[in-house]
Structure formats: C-alpha cells, structure tokens
Image (spheres, coloured by chain):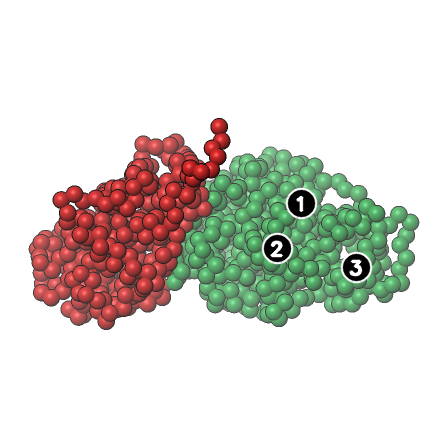
Amino acid sequence: MTRHLISIEDLDRDGIEKILERAEAFSEVTDRHIKKVPALRGRTVLNLFYEASTRTRSSFELAAKRLSADVVNFAASGSSVEKGESLKDTVLTLAAHSPDAVVVRTPWAGAATMVTQWTDAAVVNAGDGKHEHPTQALLDVFTLKQKLGKLDGRSIWIVGDVAHSRVARSNILAFQKMGAKVTVCGPPTLIPRGIEALGCDVRYELSGLRDADVVYALRMQNERMHDAYVPSLREYAARYQINGRRLGPRQILMHPGPVNRGVELSGEVVDSPQAVITMQVKSGVVVRMAVLYELLAGAPADDRLPSPEEPQLA
Amino acid sequence: MTMLVCAPAQPATLLIRGARVLDPRLHIDTTLDVLVREGEIAQLADAGTLDAPQGAEVVEAAGKLLVPGFVDPHVHLRTPGQEYKEDLETGTRAAAAGGFVAVVGMANTSPTIDSAPVLGALLDAAAREARVPVGFVATVTRGMQGEELTEMAELRELGAVAFSDDGKPIVNAQMMRKALQYQRLCGGVIALHEEDPALSGKGSMHEGEVSALLGIAGIPSVSETTMIARDCALAAYEEGRIHVQHLSARGSLEIISAAKSAGVQVTCEASPHHLCLTHEDVRSMSTSMKMNPPLREEHDRQALIAGLRDGTVDCIATDHAPHARDEKEVPFEQAPMGTTGLETAFASVYTELVKPGVLPLGLVIDKLSAGAATMDLPLTAIEVGRRADLTLLDLEATWVVGEHGYESRSENCCFAGRELFGTVLLTVAAGAVAFRERSLRLAAAS
C-alpha cells in the first residue's frame, strides 16, 4: 500500500482487496465484548477536520481507539483557523507533535495531497472538497462484498447530485476497479460535463433502474435549490426519489448518509430490508481500522526513538 | 499622447558581431555585424566587416540570434498596492530578462489606475525605476466597478496607452457600448478580459473531463466565447476598436475570425501558457497551473496555434501575473489566478512550438513583438537609424525554469522545473542595455 491514502486512484484492485481482507479480520474485534486490540498502541492519530462531520470523524476516532492508538481531534471551528491561520501553518504546528497518521477533511480539492508535504505522518483523505472520499468508497465496497460476494459484472447505479459529490467520484472509481459496471443518473444540471471520462454511463432518467443490482442514492442538499440546479425538491423527488415503487425486492439500496427522508429516499425504502445504510456505518469502522493498520503497522515502529544502547545526550 | 517611460540609462555603444539577424517584418534573415552607436542602430554590414569604434563594447555573437525586441501588451506590475508581489523595478527587470523591450501594465492595482493622479504618480515612478519602457492602461470604469466611465479623455492626454478593466469583464453591455462611443473622442483601444461571471460561477479550472475527475467547479469555454461575440457585435455597431486579451477557447477564435472578415476592428492575443499547456496539466492540482482564463483542451490549444499561423491571433502576450508564495501555497480552489510569464515567454514557445516544427521561428519572433501595434505603440525593427530595441538569443542553450530563481519578485511560474531551450543573452531597450546574461556580463567586465 502507498504511504498515504489520498485517492482511490492510488490503489489497484489487489490493494483494495488487501484492505478489505484486513477489515474482515477486524470485524471479529468489533463483535467482541472488549472491542480493542493493541495493534497501534503508542501511535498517535490526529483527526484534522475543517468541515462539520459527525459520522466520518467518529468512525475514524473509533477505528483508531479500537486499535489502541491515541487520538487527538482538531476541529477548525474554535481554533486558530478562525484567526486566519493558513492550512500550511496549522499542519506545520500540529505536525510538530509528531503524529503517526493525520486524517484530514477539508472543503478543498487537493488539500490532503498538500498536507503530505508538510508532515512526515501518513495522511488519510477523509474528504477533500468535491474531489474524493476514498474510505467511504472502501467501506461501500466492503459492504457490497458482504452482500454479494463479488462485484464483478454487477450493475451499480449512483443516483442524484453527482456534481457536488466526492462520494460519487471515489465510488465510480472503486466499483469499476472491482469489476462492476457503473451508471450515474440525475438531473442534467447535477451531472458534471465530462464525467463519462471516468468510464461510467450517464442517464438522466430512472427508467432502466430495474436492471441495477445496487442502487446508490446520493444526498440532495437544500442549498442546491438556491443555486437553481433543480426547480424544486418536489420535482426532484418526483423524478429521482428512490421509493417503494422504483426499488425492486432484490436490489440493494445504499446511501452515504445523512439521509433526507422524503427527498432522495422515501421513508419506506430507508426502513426496508433492501437498505444496508446502517451496515455501511458499521463497515466504516472496520475498514478505517484496516486503513490505519495498513498505513502504520507496516512502517517500523518507534523509529524515532533512540535505541537503549545508543549514548544519550545530556 | 501615448507614453512609454523608463529610468534614464546610458545609451549603448555596441558592436554585435556575426549574429544571425532575423527581422521577419523587414524580411531580414542573414548573418550580420550590427553596430549600435549612442543607443541608435548605426550600421548593418556583412559579418566580420565592421570594426568596433573607440569605447564600444563588442559582443561576439556568432551562432546567436538577434531579433527585434519583444513587446508585451499585457503584464501585471502590481504597483501601486501589491508591491509584495511585484513592483515596477522587479517587473521590468523580469521583462528585460525575458527579452522584452517594452511592456504595458494593467490597471487592476490597488487603487486601480482610474484617475489622472494615480496614472501620473505611476508614470513618475516608472521614470525612476523601470528598466525597460513601460506604459499603462487606465481602467474603462471607475474602480473597475462597471458602473461609471473613467475620465478617459484626461487619462488619455496624460499618457494612458489604452483602456482595460482586465481582471474583470465589463458585464453591463450598455456600459461597454458607452465606452466604445466615448472612444471616438479620446481614442485608445479597449482591451477586454472576456468572461461572463454568471457562467464562470465559482469555477477555478476549465470545465471538462479533468474538472469532472477532480471535482473542481469548471469555467466553461462559452463563458469567454459569448462575451466576445457580444463585444464584437457592439464594436461593429459603434465602429469602435477592441483588443481581446488572453484568448483561450476554440469557439472564441471562430467568433474573432468571423468578425475580422466582416471588417470589425478587433485584435487579439494568446499567452504562452495557453499555447503550450492544457487542462491535463492541472491534474496535479498545482496552483501554478491556475489562471484565468483557465488552461483548456488540446483542441483549444491547437486552434490558438492555427490562429497564430493564419493571423487571427495578432500577438503573443504573457499576462504575467505574479503572486506571493503564501498566496499560492494553499489548496487549488483557494489560490489566486495567474502565472508569471515574462522570463519564460520565448523559451516556452520556442521549446514547445518552434523546435518540434509546429510554428516557424520567424512567425513566433514577429508575434512576440507584434503586440506593440495592437496598443498603438511603434513596432520594433532592426533598421539603420532606429533606436536600438534588440534581443539577442541563444537557441542552443537549455535551462531549467526557476533553478536559479527569477528576476520577478514572485515565483508562481507554470513552467517551473521544466527544461527549456532558448536563453536571452542581451536585451537592449530604448537604446540602453537592460539585461546581460551572465556570460556576457563577464565578457563586458573583462
């Protein structure tokens, strides 16, 4: 595995499978009464979050803690970022504490890559703007493998606001690497020009959705109304909502959360047996455990400490 | 009165011996000795026939290329207000190092160049600090707000080379129309940054496959093309004269080509970065690759090259846009738009387009100084009796951009780290030596 996890593009199919196998092994830990292993004892994981996030941040925090790592959470609000400190200066300051891994979420594409220049720590991209969210894609693949065994030849539809979704970009890449065929579907105003270059099909209507093995709905954000991407939530829901009428009994329904019930998903499908949304959340912890383990446990431990034999400077 | 000013300098007396002299506009391409006496081109003679007069510096230039000095109609000198990015001295030093003998500074400074006192103070400062002659455009609208015309007639009398709100488009068509009407009184081409801000939105790179992959909001090429179509129509209607800056899209060239055929008075420029790079170079999300208009697609780049060849594109202009390191050392979407370009203009175009045989050398040399005409400035020429405005080039030498730093105060160069062919050995601007490459400095000292 590479030294950092910035993009699904950094991984090949073998690399993805290696992480998923590791996650599978960690699944057993989370079902124990004592949900903890000493794999990363003495290592420090820094969560650097420039955007509001509850599920991703807590998922990384739980993952690190279940591996016995020490976790420091840094949120941009209430910090010197509000006093105008740059990303570079914030990272340099926090890097002075010698974290072993930095998990970074920002509203800016490419920011996680920049962070790698300013710290020796392994960097995990937990979302950079609308670019990528690779651990989300890995946990989605993990979830699907549990349900389907293999993704080869499966048809996956990603439905909704593709333009503003880092989840969509990472998932298109990851699902295809695992052998699935991806179709993106949404209003033309929310499908970015040129997206087919990623290898996916583009549709503007849900007709044909029945052929999908997996329906992956994206969150429809309210602010898209203000920017006139769609005329109304009502019309959006009428055209693109996944509901009981549109979802087949053997299709799997996924969503990255948080769900807007009644907008991209109807209440009944969220609660239906086809929905694996809470399973995705559960997969999140074990997959992130696997990512942190692969990045940190592979590296020589305690390499910054002088060995006891070496003379110590006074 | 159009005015180019620079700090006083010793007029040069130089014998440039045995260079290949290439002046495409005068159809000269032969090996000559060129004598510059007291800043004026005094004699052109067969190579090896001229003797250096008393006190003359001799430049042995066999195997080197002597061309009319380059003129850049579009640079940002950041003065007044943003001297931490560039000032008149560093900006014109970068120009001289790039072989430019005259540059035209844009008016999106702080404060903007929108009144006689601001322009007057700048011209005074240039007369103290500028290494090569520099002229300034004044803004079309006060504070570049797009709401009221500046006192264009007074600004023009004081020496504004042209008018431009560069950095911003003139969004209101009626304002644009009034500026074209007022141009009948005061003259001066109106240079246009063409972009529809509603279409550009929050975009920070070209809208296409790469922006789709990176999840970065795109600036569609029609944002430029639609505004150019509007302004060509207005210029035709008012019989005004416009110059379209930093052309980037194929569709825009089609509009300008059609307008030119219809007799509209429109000229346009292309930048070295739009001629050499595409949105593929933005994949790395390097902020040096962020500029406005953005790097576009290969077919756009090819259209610009074809435009240079068929004359639709009148000149090459750098849009030299310096920014401080800390401003560019931020995530791509937060970074300011712009790349420096003065020091790499010739070498980048020579390496990417001339050396592979895409464009003839003479054409590129012509286009690197033809910007003078678009701004009503005299064209440089290698002709006896003319003031010496000359650039001596070494086409064989290679260099790595940025390896030894820059003359510019800023280092945000999109070509940084590339190995390029073509170095500038000597720049003679307004009759004085403005730049000497190190080897020549040693020769001059010995």
Q: Is residue A312 visible?
A: yes
Q: Which residue is mark 1?
A: B93
Please name whichever residue, A162 or A282, is drawn nearer the observer in this view of the structure.
A282
Rendered image: mark on residue A120: none
The residue wearing badge 2 is B400
Give the answer, above or below, for where B384 lies relative to B325. below
Residue in view at x 33 percent, y 49 percent: A297
Please state which amino acid type lies under the numbered disc 1.
Answer: Arg
Disc 3 is placed on an element classified as loop
Colour chain A is painted in: red
Numbered circles on residues, count: 3
Tag 2 subunit: B
Mark 1 lies on a secondary structure that is: helix
Label 3 to label 2: alpha-carbon separation: 23 Å
Tell me what hue chain B is rendered in.
Answer: green
| Chain of the residue on which disc 3 is drawn | B
State which tag comes first along the sequence, 3 or 2: 3
The amino acid sitting under disc 3 is: Ala
Q: Position of residue B292 (x, y in %)?
A: 48, 52
Residue found at the far front of this picture: A309
